[in-house]
Amino acid sequence: MQRLVLATLFLSSSLLALDWDIRGQASLWNNSNTEELQKTQIGLRYIPELALTHNISSESFIDVDISYNAFSRYDFGANDSRSSISPYRFWLRWSALQFEARLGLQQIKFGQAVILRPLMWFDQIDVRDPQQFSKGVPALLLRYYFLNNANVWLWGVLGEGDTRGLEIFPSEENSLEYGGRIQYPTPAGEAALSWHHRRADASPLLPDYLANAVAPFSEDRFAIDGKWDVGIGLWFESAVIHKKFNGIPGSFEPLPSIGKSDFYQKYLSIGADYTFGLGNGLHILGEHLVFANSSELAGRDKRSEFSTLLADYNFSLWDTALGILYYNWETHEWYKFLTWRRTYDNFSFNVSLFWNPDAPLMAADDESSTFGRGKGFQIMVIFNH
């Protein structure tokens, strides 16, 4: 009994020292094509979040973040609806002065590019999305910060049998992925090296007669990126993804090097931005991406290029306008996006116009809300509490 009383007193004192906060975000939107208004889609999302913090000492603390994604979408054209509730963030973190360890379902994001991002390895953040929605990954992330602002990241990620970021092939289910990153300060900026290893599975994308004949294969990603402020902001991201497999017989579109044991994807993105002293400040940002596939590291079997130009301007404390142009140099197609946002303490109203080709700019799942095809508009209301 004495031990039970002591344990109860200890637990009570711990709970009294626990700081907590409940918040959330609700959003309602439509996706409408002006040429096919009858195919309008509407969506609703609510993300409740619970944050817990416990101070261990003056130099360290433990915190927990728990949130869920309650999502519902209805497509008038297909007379089809989809709803789901799933964990959005679910992690535990220990933080000290120069170190932190975070375990659980979390967002991992790094790199310097803003729109055309070769280092979009674990997230799906789209600069056009007012929600900045991105699914989490189950992972252990360790970060150490040196006194000179250098930092080291190490991570282990659990493969869940789905794709993330720019991936074509899903990860092997229940496989262990791992990697790391080191960032180091340079004059007027910083540079970084990143690496990631995983096992990928091509069978979900193959015809049935090939699916059982192709084993999961290894994939290694190597990247370097940097950013500098030299009057204007300058940055780059470069990544090489090496897939090693025994070859896939027949013809399979995502892999031009059929039958080869090595396959390379190569990315290079360069960018710059500057804020002009016009009115409240006109911010201009540009990026250019070169992407190539080959069966040899120095080869180039297929090459694609994208350019983008972003401009944003704050008309007042409440009103912001943002415009983005994308250009595909291979197909000579333009993607145009314009949005106006009015922000209050808790509410955000977003009205967006898009004028795109029929093909989407990038892959998106059913929960994406900003990937309009053709000419159309979107209205989104966001409430934060």
Image (spheres, rainbow, N blue to C red):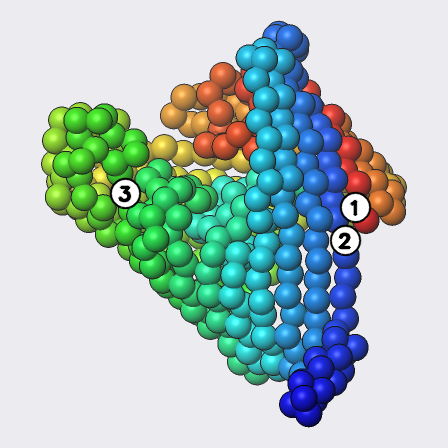
Establish if 159 lies above or below 195. Answer: above
Residue at the spot of label 1:
384
Inter-mark Cα distance, 1 to 2: 8 Å
In depth, the one of 378 and 21 nearer the eye is 21
The quadrant of the picture occupied by the N terminus is bottom right
Inter-mark Cα distance, 1 to 3: 39 Å
Amino acid of disc 3: Asp
**Residue at the spot x=68%, y=45% of the render?**
47
**Residue at the spot x=58%, y=35% of the render?**
84
Residue at the spot of label 3:
201
Amino acid of disc 2: Arg
Q: Position of residue 155 (x, y in %)?
A: 43, 65
In depth, the one of 305 and 101 nearer the eye is 101
In depth, the one of 267 and 5 nearer the eye is 5
**Residue at the spot x=59%, y=49% of the render?**
88
Q: Earlier in the sequence, mark 3 or mark 2?
A: 2
Amino acid of disc 1: Asn
Residue at the spot of label 2:
23
Q: Going by the image, does 37 lie left or right of 140?
A: right
SS at mark 3? loop
Q: Are marks 1 and 2 in contact (CB under 8 Å)?
A: yes
Q: Residue furthest bottom?
A: 2
Q: Position of residue 243 (x, y in %)?
A: 24, 47
Q: Which mark is residue 85?
A: none
Write down the quadrant of residue 148 in the picture: bottom right
SS at mark 2? strand
